[in-house]
Image (cartoon, rainbow, N blue to C red):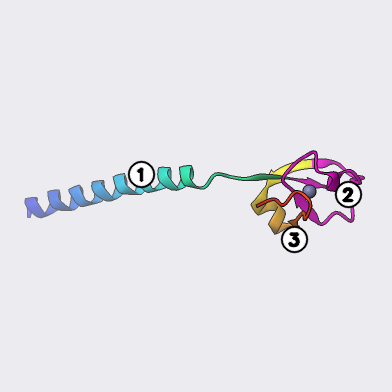
Amino acid sequence: MKQLLSLFLTISLLCAFSGNSVTIESAAASETAYVYICTGGSATKYHAKATCRGLNNCRGKMVKISVEEAKKQGRTPCSICNPK
Ligand SMILES: [Zn+2]
C-alpha cells in the first residue's frame, strides 16, 4: 500500500513537471505579432507597419495591438503592407 502511494506521488509530480514544461514551450513558440490600426470611424484594416501609406488617411489615433485583437475587431489585413 505504501509503494502504491509513492508511485502515485511520483506520477503526479511527473505530471506537474511536464505540465510546466509544456506551458513554457508554448509560450516561447507563440510569439505575439503586433499590428497597427487606426481608430478612426471607417478604418477596417490592420497594418504591419506604422509607416504604411494606408494609415496616412487615419483621422483617429494609431494604436498598436496584437493580430488576434485586430481580428476580433473584424479587421482585415492591409493590401499595401501585407501583415501576416
Ligand atoms: Zn498597411
Q: Quadrant of the N terminus?
A: bottom left
Mark 1 sits near ligand 1, with its Cβ under 8 Å away? no
In the rendered image, residue 22, in percent from the top left (x then y), is placed at 38, 48
Provide the residue designation for mark 2: 40
Residue to which mark 1 is pinned = 21
Magenta residue span: 36-62
Mark 3, residue position:
74
Q: Is residue 12 rendered to the left or right of residue 39?
A: left
Instruction: Sort mark 2 into few (<14), some (14-19) or many (20+) by Cα contacts within 10 Å.
Output: few
Q: At label 3, which amino acid type do we have?
A: Gly
| Amino acid of disc 2 | Gly
Distance from disc 3 to disc 2, alpha carbons, whole Å, reads 14 Å
53 or 47: which is nearer to us?
53
Is 21 part of what is drawn in magenta? no
Whether pointer 2 and pointer 1 mark residues with C-beta atoms closer than 8 Å, the reply is: no
Indicate left or right for 26 with 44 as reference. Answer: left
